[in-house]
Image (cartoon, rainbow, N blue to C red):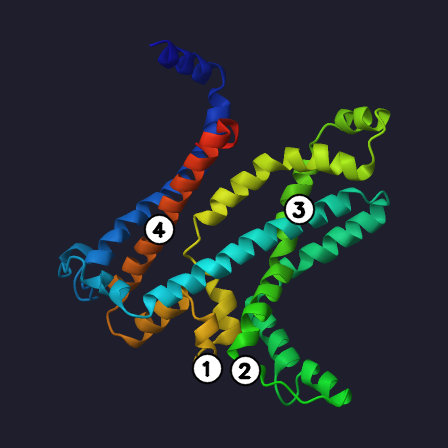
């Protein structure tokens, strides 16, 4: 009763502020919650002649693709890529955020921040053209460089072993800037009194970073980690599809869950149910990972837990 009474009083005093939440609430309701009704597609053999609820119900038939022999390999590829993206991505984002925060020259600081952040706005189509012009066998810049050194050319587009490195590099190149801005904003919000007190005690810049900056970045890191783990089974489809395309020679090291499902749903008629089943599986997998990770974080330090 006290909580309800307190909420009513809070609403009466700040009803205008609550009014500002209405557009946000409607946005999430329309774009995030109402489409959840489409989960029913996963259990139907959808066809366009009938409506959603009139399509034949097939139960878990659309989930049979999970029993395919390739699924374990695809799942392993997807998870390993995402783990590398999350670990290296956060480490480099924190590194560059701390590095830029130590730059005193404002013009140099803004220039460096812009240069690192700009690749985030490069479209995947342009990225595909860039990668092709660098690694193509006949006219690629890299092979022309090797030829100039008297070394043999490398056929990247027929050698799967190189592509985990290529994909990881360009993912980091494109996405480091976005996360860096988030960490940089957190560093900016740290009170200068901590650093002033540390300087009085004779702490070096390295010691200030180690004992002040890094520990205070931990809550931000954990939140970003939990959000990233929610998509642990959702690969960067645009990145993989644009860089690799339908080059089956490279699938052994570059095929992920999303690209596999895409090929199935585009080659089989009336496969909307299969695509929905795949998306539901990915979401449930990510949800379980978030719950387990948050549980472990809560056991160690409840203050850092998301819920």
State the residue position of label 2: 157
In the drawing, what numbered circle is on residue 249?
1
Q: Residue at x 76, y 47 (%)?
A: 99
Whether residues under marks 1 and 2 lie with C-beta atoms below 8 angstroms apart, the answer is: yes
| Marks 3 and 4, the one that precedes in the sequence | 3
C-alpha span from label 4 to label 1:
29 Å
Q: Tell me if mark 1 has few (under 14), some (14-19) or many (20+) residues whose alpha carbon lies within 10 angstroms of its own.
A: few
Q: Residue at x 72, y 88 (%)?
A: 151
Q: Residue at x 18, y 58 (%)?
A: 60
| Marks 1 and 3, the one that precedes in the sequence | 3
Q: Tell me if mark 2 has few (under 14), some (14-19) or many (20+) residues whose alpha carbon lies within 10 angstroms of its own.
A: some
> Is residue 292 positioned above or below 114 on the image?
above
The x and y percentages for residue 69 are 29, 70
The x and y percentages for residue 35 are 32, 49
C-alpha span from label 3 to label 4:
28 Å
| Marks 4 and 1, the one that precedes in the sequence | 1
C-alpha span from label 2 to label 3:
33 Å
- The answer to which of 97 and 69 lies nearer the viewer is 69
In the drawing, what numbered circle is on residue 94?
3
Kindly state the secondary structure of the residue where label 2 is placed. Answer: helix
Q: Residue at x 39, y 49 (%)?
A: 286
| Marks 2 and 4, the one that precedes in the sequence | 2
> Is residue 16 positioned above or below 307 on the image?
above
Whether residues under marks 1 and 3 lie with C-beta atoms below 8 angstroms apart, the answer is: no
State the residue position of label 4: 285
The answer to whether residue 34 is left or right of residue 202 is left
C-alpha span from label 1 to label 3:
36 Å
């Amino acid at each position: 009763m006290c909580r309800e009474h307190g909420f009513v009083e809070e609403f009466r005093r700040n009803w205008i502020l609550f009014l500002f939440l209405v557009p946000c609430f409607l946005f999430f309701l329309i774009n995030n919650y109402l489409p959840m009704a489409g989960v029913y597609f996963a259990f139907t053999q959808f066809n366009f002649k009938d409506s959603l609820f009139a399509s034949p119900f097939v139960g878990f038939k659309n989930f049979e693709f999970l029993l395919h022999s390739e699924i374990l390999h695809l799942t392993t590829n997807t998870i390993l890529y995402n783990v590398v993206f999350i670990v290296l991505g956060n480490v480099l984002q924190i590194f560059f955020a701390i590095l830029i925060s130590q730059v005193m020259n404002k013009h140099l600081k803004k220039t460096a921040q812009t240069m690192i952040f700009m690749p985030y706005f490069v479209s995947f189509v342009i990225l595909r053209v860039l990668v092709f012009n660098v690694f193509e066998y006949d006219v690629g810049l890299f092979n022309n460089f090797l030829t100039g050194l008297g070394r043999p050319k490398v056929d990247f587009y027929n050698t799967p072993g190189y592509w985990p490195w290529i994909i990881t590099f360009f993912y980091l190149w494109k996405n480091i800037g976005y996360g860096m801005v988030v960490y940089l904003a957190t560093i900016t919000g740290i009170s200068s009194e901590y650093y002033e007190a540390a300087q009085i005690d004779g702490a070096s810049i390295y010691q200030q970073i180690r004992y002040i900056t890094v520990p205070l970045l931990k809550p931000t890191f954990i939140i970003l980690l939990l959000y990233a783990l929610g998509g642990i089974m959702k690969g960067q489809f645009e990145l993989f599809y644009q860089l690799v395309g339908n080059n089956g020679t490279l699938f052994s090291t570059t095929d992920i869950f999303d690209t596999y499902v895409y090929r199935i749903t585009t080659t089989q008629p009336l496969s909307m149910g299969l695509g929905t089943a795949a998306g539901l599986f990915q979401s449930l997998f990510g949800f379980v990972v978030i719950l387990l990770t948050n549980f472990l974080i809560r056991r160690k330090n409840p203050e850092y837990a998301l819920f």
